[in-house]
Image (cartoon, rainbow, N blue to C red):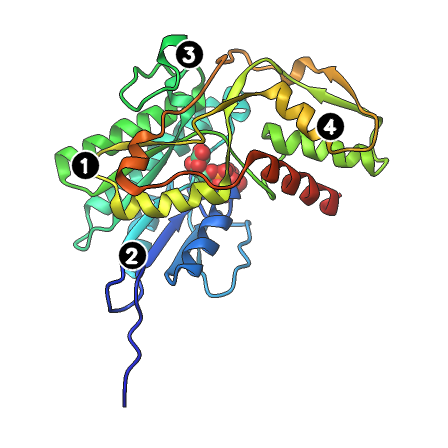
Amino acid sequence: MKSTLLCNFNGKAGTAMKSFIIGGAGFVGDYLIRYLQAEGQKVAVTKMPGETIDIPDADVYDLNILDKNGIVDLLEQVRPDYVYHLAAQSSVAVSWKNPQLTIDVNIKGSVNVLEAIRGLSHKPRTLLIGSGEEYGPIRPEETPVTEENAIRPGNIYAATKACQNMFGRIYAQAFGLEVMMVRAFNHIGPNQDSLFVVADFCRQTAEIEAGLKEPVIKVGNLSVARDFTDVRDVVRAYDLLIRKGETGETYNIGSGRAIVIEDILNMILSKSKTKIQVEKDPSRFRPVDVPTIEADTRKVYEVTGWVPKIPLEQTIQETLDYWRRKI
Ligand code: A2R
């Protein structure tokens, strides 16, 4: 009888590659699980107790990354080829309100993951997800910002992610772990929590259209510029980098183009037939805000050939339509 050989994404005949996603119940996790499955991988994923992941064929486990032994047990059980570390307290706003939690989860939790991997006999290639926020105030002459730029984190979340990045490099250099780091700039798309600006504006617009809210959209600082990428492009970059990235290296993931938040707001409002007023809401302003964040993405391109494919206009339309369905 002829046996069927599975082909992994590298084109190598054998069993399918196995990915382990830590913190997969969030916005990015959902897209990453589905993307890797579509690429023919087996996917195991962790979530916080109480969260749900309802994706067929994904092996789902409960894990709090503050429990180092729990990470070790799961890694020994799953024996993955790749580990994507997504688990985080991922909101800048929450990091100002709860620095201790942010520091525990994002620093201690990440070191727990690295330590757990260090103790394994079969060491998976690992991707740590950091943030463009790590760069902090980027000077005009430093834009678009490269991975070699000085980092001057301007908020608690950014500082924790910068720390995670340093630990990743140290574990790669000192212990030979195959760890790569990314600095992801703003990623957006359907299903994102409305704590984040594009989802927030789309949600408010959909609520106004449905008559659930007076026709006034509440906004924070509209003058800052950020680099937005569709989450589906982002997870494609993660998959390429975990296979092709160089150990100990950091890669920016972004569109390479900063857009002023006011332009994003106007793009959303132009898609609505309802007349909507804009009102500044002091509670939405951050204690410190970086004026422009824009990525230089040549490094990821050189190693993987990745460039984002989905236009901003399409992502915004799909995000608005998602909120219209949800409301
Ligand atoms: O905070 P929750 O309950 O929504 O759970 C989040 C989870 N998480 C944890 N997992 C294990 N142990 C913990 N102590 C812990 N604390 C939080 O990580 C959530 O399910 C997941 C992160 O998902 P999101 O907050 O939706 O982040 P997203 O947008 O998927 O970003 C993925 C990564 C994060 O490292 C971001 O900082 C970075 O990309 O931009």
> Residue 313: x and y, percent?
61, 35
Q: Quadrant of residue 218?
A: top right
Q: In the image, which disc is placed on residue 269?
A: 4
Q: What secondary structure is found at the residue carrying circle 2?
A: loop
Q: In the image, which disc is placed on residue 324?
A: none
Question: What's under tag 1, amino acid-wise?
Answer: Ala
Which is more toward the observer, 111 or 134?
134
Looking at the image, is mark 3 or mark 2 nearer the viewer? 3
* Structural distance between the alpha carbons of marks 3 and 2: 38 Å
Question: What's under tag 2, amino acid-wise?
Answer: Pro
- Name the quadrant of the N terminus: bottom left
Identify residue for label 3: 137
Ligand 1 contact, mark 1 (Cβ < 8 Å): no
Q: In the image, which disc is placed on residue 172?
A: 1
Which is more toward the observer, 286 or 305?
305
- Earlier residue among tags 4 and 2: 2
> Residue 262: x and y, percent?
64, 19
- Earlier residue among tags 4 and 1: 1
